[in-house]
Amino acid sequence: MMLGTVRRFGVSHALRATAPRSISARLATQLAKCQIPSALSSLAATRSLHSSFPRLSAATAEAIVEETEPSKSAILTEFSDLATDNLIHNKIIKNIIQPDRMNLKTMTEVQSLTLNEIVKGDDILAQAKTGTGKTLAFLVPTLQNILNDPSVDVSKVGRRSARTGPSEIRALIISPTRELAEQIAVEARKVAFGTGLVVQTAVGGTQKRAGLIKIQQEGCHLLIGTPGRLKDILSDPWTGVSAPKLNTLILDEADRLLDQGFAPDVEEIQSLLPDPTKVDRQTLMFSATVPREVMQMVRQTLKPDFKHVNTVREDEVPTHHRVPQKLVYTRGLENSLPALLELAQNWQSRRDNGEELRPFKAIAYFNSTAETKVASDAFNNLARNSEFRQSSMRNMRLLEINSRLTQALRTRSADNFRKAREGILFSSDVTARGMDFPDVTHIVQIGVPRDRETYIHRLGRTARAGKEGEGWLFMHRAEQDVYRKRLGRLPLQLDTTLESADADISQTFSNDTSVGKIVNQVTEGLAQCDGATKVKSYMGQLGTTTGNFNSKREAIQAINQLFTVGYNMQSLPELSPRLMQQMGLNRIDGVSAGDGSRQRREGGFSRGGDRGSRGGFSRGGDRGERGGFSRGGDRGGFSRGGDRGERSGFSRGGDRGGFSRGGDRGSFTRGGDRGDRGDRPSRPRRSFDESSVDDSFRF
Ligand SMILES: Nc1ncnc2c1ncn2[C@@H]1O[C@H](COP(=O)(O)OP(=O)(O)OP(=O)(O)O)[C@@H](O)[C@H]1O
């Protein structure tokens, strides 16, 4: 059984387990032979926090002892043991282990396997499952290496005189999203506390000038940022950020940064760093997924003798075994939101009935940014009704996050969700990677995600650091083929417990049944949503969902039904000829062609409620007072330009067929929202949602 792999390219060490997961007599003898600290043997047998959190197990330790002849520090597993041979600065260790600080005790497998190699200066590609502590795995040794650098005057560190601006930057971490960059910085500051090392961020959506002044005044040893902003400040001589002594580059979520969306920026950033023939550079790459397609880029970026540390067994899916993953077929696309509400309500009711369950805290992932807004608005609308307010759902925080929001709103949503005890975060893929929200119990993916990696990273927002969690995938039956082709082997099990997933929403429901109540609540919530938002969501789904179905026509039929039945809109949005051409659509497919004049004539959009009374409940009784539109209020409006420097998605260039238009630079993307490219001085590219809306509707 393969437990983990450390490969030096050229010299390869495969770590094969030959012992059960408990310490063996043989291991004990070998540990003694190798003079490994006695703490290790007890540690290998101990599971301090959670039995399923991947630590360096006895078996792995044994494998290392057998096959890699490590130095003794190579297999340290306790943070406190890092004091041995002064491997890691005492202050850093204290910050990690002290109960009033980070309060961590035992290293995870990826931490144990990479720490010594990074301190030695090797280039590393490290792959380990989501939520297994990769951030600390690169932060601790990197901060230590900065302290070890003789040109960093440790005696002066911490004093003002030692802070000499950007020229002191020794290490750079690139992250695909702003929130992740900020999160890494928070962790880095905790680790570096009291050492005098200064950590700064450079992310899009924040004031560039203010950030630069901070770096100038406070200094910077470790800079963490998003590709666009980093490229911007490093390439602009006026910023004064040149980092001549920088000798460490870290790509977190490396496979994402090396794919075609970000690779050009990352390459450019590398070219702006000191010439590696003059300043030796260590490069580290970390991710939970390393698809074969990026390996060529990995080899081009790392030194030829880089090490590949892989804690995911070759025969294993890179999701956690302990996370039940359930698949729900929905009758139509309009069934997803009722099914989500039912899932949350069922869970909360079970808690009310005395089951020992953590409060429902879920992230609902959508494939386009506009869908997150419709869903979030609908849930916030329905949460105002008295039945909801008196139910077990009453304390739910209902939050939205996607790259179209202003950075201030994004940060607020992320912070509020972090703090929330129970709630739902309606999210695009902007939070899919790296984000460490505590105590997330459920990940609900609505529609088949764009690729297997996206599925894995989204799912990885739950069950972190050894905790429990569950994953749900809601999809239309007609997405089955794409689901199999795109996601490959995954341990999903069919679930048929959610009644509203299969309800015929076009029917009238009475409030006497629980499914009726759920459908009616969602319908009412949606009826109060802004028509413009619904149109954007329709457009977004033409971009994302169409490629998920077997036939375009079938997909458009389903999206049309979502719009008319689910969103309760009378007439379909008109698509301009240009847009139809861009999307490869024609009337036969079932879209409505026009120049958008119908929408303009009708003052925007059909306001819903005109499909006749459906009895059983009043549809949007308060819409008169509110003019039929929900304006977002503190839930964050739709930012159409304040935040345009970032990309809200990119096309992977034809891997899914459908509408892909030549990689990431086309005017039309598939509506995803996978990362930030920071602020750009040049004219921003348009994303799918923007282009479609600008072409067909002006509102
Ligand atoms: N040795 C440890 N013991 C216990 N908890 C840890 C340890 N190391 C890190 N953690 C905690 O585990 C959680 C997940 O860590 P982290 O965010 O670094 O995971 P990751 O592997 O980078 O995940 P992802 O692949 O999603 O980016 C964090 O809350 C972190 O504080």
Image (cartoon, rainbow, N blue to C red):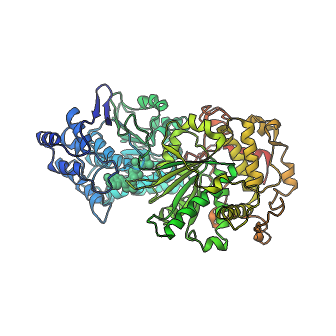
Judging depth in this view, the residue of 633 and 420 nearest the camera is 420
**Which sits in the foreground, 310 or 620?**
620
419 sits left or right of 688 in the view: left
Q: Position of residue 500 (x, y in %)?
A: 65, 56
Residue 251: quadrant of the picture: top left
The picture places residue 228, in percent across and down from the top left corner, at 54, 44
Query: Could you tell me which residue is drawn at 65 percent across and 72 percent down?
Result: 387
Q: Is residue 173 visible?
A: yes
Residue 675, image x, y percentages? 55, 46
Q: Is residue 230 visible?
A: no
Residue 664 on image: x %, y %: 61, 36
* Quarter occupied by the C terminus: bottom right
Along the viewing direction, whichever of 575 and 129 lies nearer the viewer: 129
Residue farthest top in this picture: 10
Counting every numbered tag in the picture gives 0
Quarter holding residue 97: bottom left
Q: Quadrant of the N terminus?
A: top left
Figure check: 420 above or below 680: below
Of residue 417 and residue 550, the one placed in the foreground of this image is 550
The residue that appears at 63% across and 49% down in the rendered structure is 644
Is 217 on the left-hand or right-hand side of 398?
left
